[in-house]
């Protein structure tokens, strides 16, 4: 059985490499890999004691694995894009630039801004989509080079993905391990704050800011009637609904994140000072769908891959191999395998590597909440690694970075190393961090 | 009362799935970015779960 599963694993890896090279789409490569693995296993086991379903069923069932996640992505992106379209983001940025004449304060605000969309949606690419361009403009005026600006946007994008309340890696691992998604807020927020502060200082050091007037002249104009009530009300409603379901679960119906964002979107439309037509909003939603589609396709394709790997035993093979590794080897390799798995499997890394590790640490009596948090801080680093490199690729495109991808990787290496080091310390000594739960 | 609201939310999710399916089908035939055949296939299989959901099949 081990031999057969290993052969299947090798076939799947080969299939993924070939598809990624030929088709240039990580989404379809993952789906094809899943189907190829299942198809080979179907014929391999045909007539034997152990039989698996025909791949069509695996494909369809796999598409439903992360279906709810895909809906959350779409709804959150619609909310964030409508909010940005109303001019609220521009208004806040103009106010900040006009009010604060200090480079460090502005960089801090831009960093905090970048964290919000990703923290609410769980996807760093949403932060890049929505605020990447705007933040890059302001950060450039602070005197940062193009390379440093791209690194700034990328680092805060991956930090936003790991930032609570929505951390998808943690959510997937906890769902897989039958753990409650509770106690992660401080565990995730503290390392993110440390890396964030370090990144601001590291990238902002030695740069010279442009005059305030020049920045304001180049930023887009905010709508005239945009006031604090219109800016804050949609956010207050969304955050309020999330908190209500958390703190009064027996008094309110289970709304769920997607519907919360849809309600927030209606509030955004009501609060928009410029009255827009239905056609204009339709275009925004349509553009959002196109924008967010690679992410939706990725999570759905990862589902197919997961379903196939589960059915044919490859997931178990990887899990067992990890569990049987000596602990020291695990500590040495996790910082390499974690991010690379993220680069290959996107959010599937949490299921394929994360969940078996959490089970393993649970059997050793270690604090699984801290381990889970540590792993979900390691995975985002892989967002810049091939083959998928969604956030890295997107950041370079949004910021308009003309340099080589390697030079971008060099620029982000130190903040990423710090994030990895903090996560590794949490991973090795989970007991030390239980006070943050 | 909570049961009523719960049912309403349940059906609203079918409506959301339907709206997303509509946009995916629209973008399958007419879109500005990622126009190749590869993404035609990706769009096609990504529509499947949304259509199955609105048909109450899964």
Image (cartoon, rainbow, N blue to C red):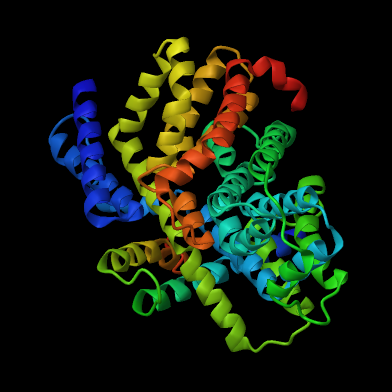
Quadrant of the rendered structure where residue A3 is?
top left
Judge whether residue A29 can be spotted in this image.
yes
Residue A272 rendering spot, x and y as whole percentages = 75, 79
Residue at 68% across / 50% down in the picture?
A115
Q: Quadrant of the N terminus of chain A?
A: top left
Residue A190 rendering spot, x and y as whole percentages = 73, 33
Residue at 49% across / 30% down in the picture?
A355
Q: Is residue A58 left or right of residue B26?
A: left
Q: Is residue A434 left or right of residue A350?
A: right
Quadrant of the rendered structure where residue A437 is?
top right
Q: Is residue A126 left or right of residue A47?
A: right
Instruction: State the residue in front, A371 or B52.
Output: A371
Instruction: State the residue in front, A8 or B2.
Output: A8
Relative vertical location of residue A55 with respect to residue B23 in this rendering, above or below = above
Residue A180 rendering spot, x and y as whole percentages = 65, 34
Residue A352 rendering spot, x and y as whole percentages = 42, 33
Judge whether residue A372 can be spotted in this image.
no
Count up the numbered dots.
Answer: 0
Residue at 62% across / 69% down in the picture?
A81
Residue at 19% across / 27% down in the picture?
A4
Relative vertical location of residue A224 with respect to residue A135 in this rendering, above or below = below
Relative vertical location of residue A159 with respect to residue A418 in this rendering, above or below = below
């Amino acid at each position: 059985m081990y031999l057969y599963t290993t052969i299947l694993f090798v076939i799947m890896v080969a299939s993924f490499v070939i598809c990624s090279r030929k088709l240039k789409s990580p989404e379809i490569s993952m789906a094809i890999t899943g189907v190829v693995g299942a198809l080979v296993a179907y014929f391999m086991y045909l007539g034997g004691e152990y039989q698996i379903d025909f791949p069509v069923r695996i494909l369809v069932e796999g598409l439903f694995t992360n279906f709810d996640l895909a809906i959350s992505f779409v709804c959150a992106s619609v909310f964030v894009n409508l909010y940005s379209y109303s001019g609220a983001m521009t208004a806040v940025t103009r106010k900040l630039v006009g009010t604060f004449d200090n480079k460090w304060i502005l960089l801090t605000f831009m960093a905090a801004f970048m964290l919000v969309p990703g923290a609410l949606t769980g996807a760093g690419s949403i932060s890049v989509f929505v605020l990447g361009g705007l933040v890059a403009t302001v950060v450039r005026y602070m005197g940062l080079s193009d390379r440093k600006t791209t690194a700034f946007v990328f680092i805060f994008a991956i930090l936003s993905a790991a930032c609570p309340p929505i951390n998808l890696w943690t959510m997937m691992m906890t769902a897989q391990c039958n753990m409650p998604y509770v106690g992660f807020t401080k565990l995730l927020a503290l390392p993110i704050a440390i890396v964030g502060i370090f990144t601001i200082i590291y990238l902002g050091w030695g740069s010279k800011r442009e005059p305030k007037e020049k920045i304001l002249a180049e930023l887009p104009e905010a709508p005239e009637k945009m006031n604090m009530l219109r800016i804050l009300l949609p956010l207050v409603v969304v955050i309020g609904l999330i908190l209500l379901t958390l703190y009064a679960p027996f008094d309110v119906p289970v709304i769920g994140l997607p519907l919360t964002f849809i309600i927030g979107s209606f509030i955004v439309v009501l609060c928009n000072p410029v009255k827009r037509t239905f056609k204009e909003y339709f275009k925004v939603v349509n553009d959002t769908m196109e924008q967010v589609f690679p992410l939706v396709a990725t999570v759905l394709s990862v589902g197919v891959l997961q379903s196939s790997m589960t059915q044919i035993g490859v997931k178990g093979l990887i899990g067992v191999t990890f569990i049987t590794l000596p602990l020291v080897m695990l500590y040495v390799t996790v910082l390499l395998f974690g991010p690379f798995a993220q680069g290959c499997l996107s959010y599937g890394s949490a299921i394929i590597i994360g969940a078996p590790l959490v089970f393993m640490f649970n059997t050793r009596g270690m604090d699984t909440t801290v381990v889970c948090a540590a792993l979900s801080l390691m995975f985002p680093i892989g967002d810049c690694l091939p083959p998928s490199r969604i956030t890295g690729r997107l950041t370079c495109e949004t910021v308009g970075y003309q340099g080589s991808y390697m030079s971008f990787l060099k620029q982000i290496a130190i903040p990423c190393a710090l994030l990895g080091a903090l996560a590794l310390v949490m991973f090795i000594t989970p007991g030390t961090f239980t006070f943050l739960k | 009362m909570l049961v009523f609201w719960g049912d309403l939310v349940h059906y609203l999710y079918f409506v959301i799935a339907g709206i997303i399916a509509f946009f995916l089908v629209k973008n399958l035939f007419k879109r500005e970015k990622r126009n190749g055949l590869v993404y035609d296939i990706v769009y096609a299989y990504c529509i499947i779960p949304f259509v199955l959901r609105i048909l109450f099949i899964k």
